[in-house]
Image (cartoon, rainbow, N blue to C red):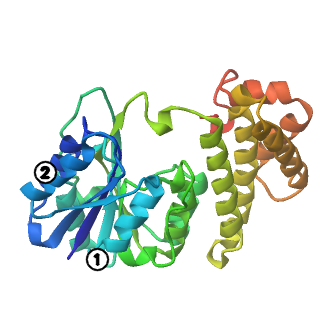
Amino acid sequence: MLLSIIIPVYNVEAYLDRCVQSVIAVLPDYTDYEVLLIDDGSTDSSGELCDALSRQYPSVVTVHKANGGLSDARNTGLGIAKGEYVGFLDSDDFWLGDLTGAFLSCLRLYPDVDIFHFGYQEIWADKSEKVSASRAEDLEKFDRISAFQDYICGEHKITRMAWDKIYKRSLFEGVEYPRGYLAEDYGCTYRLLMKAEVIVRDPAPYYGYFQRGDSIMRTKSAKLIMDEYQLGCLSFRECYDFPAYRNLRTEIVSDLVYLTMKTYVRLQPFREQPEAAAVRKAATHTCRKHLLSHTFFRTKVLQVLFLFARPLYIWIITGKGGTWGGQKAS
């Protein structure tokens, strides 16, 4: 089997059919593809809808499980996937255009591709937009060094998200999504990039990233911010010690320092909570520790401002002083 599409499902009865139909519409051969619906203990009618879709389409397989969160659902799907390649699709999102056709075109040009990376488009309300398949000359090839360099400090063509990529399933041997965290992509994508040798990016937006006000990523919380911070720190430590990234240590340390300072700013609305005090202490320690180490000049300037003129630093980093140095808190 060529490709397994893993769709975690939890209380998305209003969106699930649109999601699955967008995949079914572009599957050229049902015998070579599977769509895995991982019902993560839904309490609405999503589970029944999964079963109905499985009865209607031979390529759709439903698995019901107790609620364990997005990471656990993805890991469950990885454990039963049969495809040589796997991709992820969040159940309130949907594919735009012929993604499987673009993937097959990529395979013809790069039969050794480990990660096929494609573009996405934010979709608001119920709007959708059809896109045409990309031209071959639009494809951009990366190796693990150039991909990580872009991921950490480049144009960020290579993202941390799970769902804008199709992966060779063997990359997940010994790698899984961390359970119990929000923003779990932070704890996994960098490990897959470490193992990949050929990454090909198609900039065409084949993924519709649906924006709804109650989604996890749009509802900022201290836990979400802290999970991103903790997983980010873990990734920087592992990447710093990774032999292939030895020449990128300045970039890694600079991003670690910036992540710590940015997290401090993002936690300002929650500054009365214990997490904020812990990050304030960690940010001060990290800035002092790396003030004389190899970091980018603009990072050193921000470190000095953070340590000795913190109100000015916050004014700059929140965008009130402009997007100074190309860095702005999200």
Q: Image height check: is 75 above or below 303?
A: below
Which percent across, then down, holds residue 237? 71, 65
Please rate how many residues cluster around mark 2, counting C-alpha atoms within 10 Å: few if below 14, some from 14 to 19, many from 20.
Answer: few
Q: Residue under label 1, please give it.
A: 84
Q: Secondary structure at mark 2?
A: helix
Residue 52 is marked as 2
Residue lying at 71% horizontally and 29% vertically, measured from the top left: 270
- Closest to the observer: 89 or 10? 10
**Residue 160 appearing in the image:** yes
Q: Say which amino acid is labelled 2.
A: Ala
In terms of image quadrants, where is residue 59?
bottom left
Which percent across, then down, holds residue 68? 46, 55
- Closest to the observer: 85 or 90? 90
Residue lying at 22% horizontally and 33% vertically, measured from the top left: 128
Closer to the eye: label 2 or 1: 2
Which percent across, then down, holds residue 166? 33, 63
The extreme top residue here reads 320
- Closest to the observer: 99 or 106? 99
**Residue 131 appearing in the image:** no
Is 17 left, or right, of 38 in this rendering? left
